[in-house]
Amino acid sequence: MPFDTPAILEQLDRVELQRRRRKADPDLGLRVQGVKHYQQLRFAHTYADLLASARYRGAARYFLDELYGPQDFTERDTQLARVVPATVRLFPAEIVDVVGSVVSLHALSEELDSALAQQLPGAEIDAPRYLSAWQGTGQSAQRERQIALTLEVASALDALVHKPFLRHSLRLMRGPARAAGLGDLQQFLERGFDTFCSMRGADEFVALIGRRERLLAATLFEAGSVAQQQAAFALLPSQTPTGA
């Protein structure tokens, strides 16, 4: 979908709402951090082969660090909220739409992280607790939306690679972007562009992520019997220690 200033700001407001909830409830904040650490381990577990692949390592690492990491994006989001009008005005529409998709994915992921954390007894997570938390949320449709947005971001970045004039435009934007306070966003976009360009085609990468994420989601939400639970556990890392 095309993104304009109000649409992007609305997504950032959703993220800020989750931050305020966690600040008001420090215990929830700790559990959310546990969720984020575990899910980063889960991504590394699910995509160990891609992270070891010369062709796909860069793209897998980009997703792991930029979209699945437990790091605090408050400063980045605050800066972006301040300069959204400049972003929409200065960057080509195709790039603005990528930014909008990334922020939408960020907002939904923060909401799902909070929902998962509310189902947990503490910040220490293992495979059984993670399975139980997902089932406790009952948010299979939202999880599918999260997967779809992830694939949308990957496909959009790949599409930019096939439009050399956009890469040239992005390079020309370095000076104006820094002057407008968009330096971090500029670097994020350039890293994504260069990463997908070096992959020499992302169709297999995107399809593989879609298959594995949907298999995991179906396994988590459908795991009722002992055998189904064991199948789910096989797709998950064992545990992340508290405060990892």
Image (cartoon, rainbow, N blue to C red):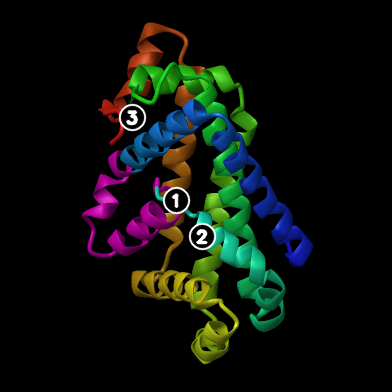
Task: Tell me residue 175's x, y (percent).
Answer: 52, 90
Q: Is residue 55 visible?
A: yes
Q: Are marks 1 and 2 in contact (CB under 8 Å)?
A: yes
SS state under label 1? loop
Residue 10 is labelled as none
Residue that carries the numbered disc 2 in the rendered image: 75
Q: Earlier in the sequence, mark 3 or mark 2?
A: 2
Measured Cα–Cα span from mark 1 to mark 2: 8 Å
Question: Could you tell me the amino acid type at mark 2?
Answer: Glu
Task: Tell me residue 76's x, y (percent).
Answer: 52, 62
Q: Is residue 49 left or right of residue 135?
A: left
Residue 212 versus residue 236 in the image, above or below = below
Residue 235 is labelled as 3
Residue that carries the numbered disc 1 in the rendered image: 72
Question: Could you tell me the amino acid type at mark 1?
Answer: Asp
Q: Are marks 1 and 3 in contact (CB under 8 Å)?
A: no
How many C-alpha atoms fall within 10 Å of the one at disc 3: few (<14), some, or many (≥20)?
A: some
The number of callouts visible is 3
Q: Quadrant of residue 236?
A: top left
Residue drawn at 38 percent across, 26 percent down: 123
Residue toward you, 214 or 107: 107
Q: Is residue 66 left or right of residue 99?
A: left
Task: Tell me residue 110's x, y (percent).
Answer: 56, 41
Task: Tell me residue 239's x, y (percent).
Answer: 28, 26
Question: Could you tell me the amino acid type at mark 3?
Answer: Leu
